[in-house]
Image (tube, grey):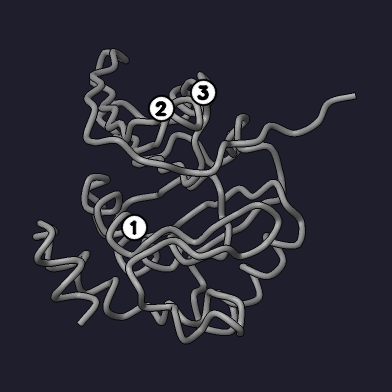
């Protein structure tokens, strides 16, 4: 019912994305007391001020990313690990950065238990990305910065694509950014969204 009512009927067309969302057991990525609500089409709190995005948004952002089997993807904001799992069904490798230690540990444990061996999680500041494995074919953000961090744009390869919510908490837009072979950026707004703010690491 989730797929038919909230994914396909709302315009998601990529059969690979639909398959991935159908395959990943979302209930494994939510707190045990919320498992009965895991397949509702709405975000759910996972603690530490974070949420697991609603299935439609995950599917829409994944489709906009246009993942290919050979892609290396940088994800900013591991959260529960659900978006990373959906991507792991579709790409070669996902490098995911999470700033909250408890979420990074929990997501890593869940992904490992479910057999995802192509997701790599790093505890760190998402604003800095994960430069050691750059450039990435695709970049996706699951929390909203006020402005796109320059470091993430620089870690996107020419010809690559970035999907991110951007803006202040009461005025966020989902953006797709394409980087051409000359290093120029083409940005387009998709629709209004509401994500938790992207938090930078505290610096002394």
Q: CA distance from mark 3 to mark 2?
A: 10 Å
Q: Could you say where residue 83 lies in the image, as x and y percent from the top left?
A: 43, 60
Local crowd size for mark 2, using a 10 Å CA cut-off: few (<14), some (14–19), many (≥20): few
Mark earlier in primary sequence (2, 1):
1
Local crowd size for mark 1, using a 10 Å CA cut-off: few (<14), some (14–19), many (≥20): many
Q: Residue at x 40, y 49 (%)?
A: 72
Residue occupied by mark 2: 171
Q: Secondary structure at mark 2?
A: strand
Q: Could you say where residue 193 lies in the image, as x and y percent from the top left?
A: 35, 40
Residue occupied by mark 3: 146
Q: Secondary structure at mark 1?
A: helix
Local crowd size for mark 3, using a 10 Å CA cut-off: few (<14), some (14–19), many (≥20): some
Q: Quadrant of the N terminus?
A: bottom left
Q: Residue at x 37, y 61 (%)?
A: 54
Q: Residue at x 49, y 35 (%)?
A: 144
Please give left or right for residue 198 compared with residue 178 in the image.
right
How many numbered dots are placed on residues in this image? 3
Residue occupied by mark 1: 58
As displayed, is residue 24 above or below residue 101? below
Q: CA distance from mark 1 to mark 3?
A: 20 Å
* Quadrant in which residue 182 is drawn: top left
Q: Pick the residue in front: 183 or 198.
A: 198
As displayed, is residue 174 above or below residue 67? above
Q: Secondary structure at mark 3?
A: loop
- Nearer to us of marks 3 and 2 is 2
Q: Residue at x 29, y 53 (%)?
A: 62
* Quadrant in which residue 32 is drawn: bottom right
Could you tell me if the residues under marks 3 and 2 are in contact, i.e. CB atoms within 8 Å?
A: no
Mark earlier in primary sequence (3, 2):
3
Q: Could you say where residue 155 lies in the image, as x and y percent from the top left?
A: 47, 29
């Amino acid at each position: 019912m989730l797929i038919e009512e909230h994914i396909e009927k709302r315009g998601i067309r990529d059969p690979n994305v639909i398959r991935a969302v159908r395959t990943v057991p979302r209930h494994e990525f939510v707190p045990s007391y919320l498992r009965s609500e895991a397949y509702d089409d709405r975000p759910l709190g996972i603690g530490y001020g974070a949420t697991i995005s609603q299935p439609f948004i995950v599917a829409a952002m994944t489709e906009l990313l246009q993942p290919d089997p050979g892609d290396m993807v940088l994800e900013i904001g591991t959260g529960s690990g659900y978006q990373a799992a959906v991507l792991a069904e579709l790409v070669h490798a996902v490098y995911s950065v999470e700033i909250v230690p408890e979420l990074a540990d929990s997501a890593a444990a869940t992904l490992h238990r479910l057999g995802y061996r192509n997701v790599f999680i790093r505890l760190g500041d998402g604003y800095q990305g994960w430069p050691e494995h750059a450039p990435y074919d695709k970049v996706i953000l699951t929390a909203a910065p006020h402005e796109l961090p320059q470091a993430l744009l620089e870690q996107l390869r020419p010809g690559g694509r970035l999907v991110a919510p951007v803006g202040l908490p009461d005025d966020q837009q989902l953006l797709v950014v394409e980087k051409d072979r000359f290093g120029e950026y083409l940005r387009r707004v998709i629709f209004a969204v509401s994500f938790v703010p992207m938090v930078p690491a505290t610096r002394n």
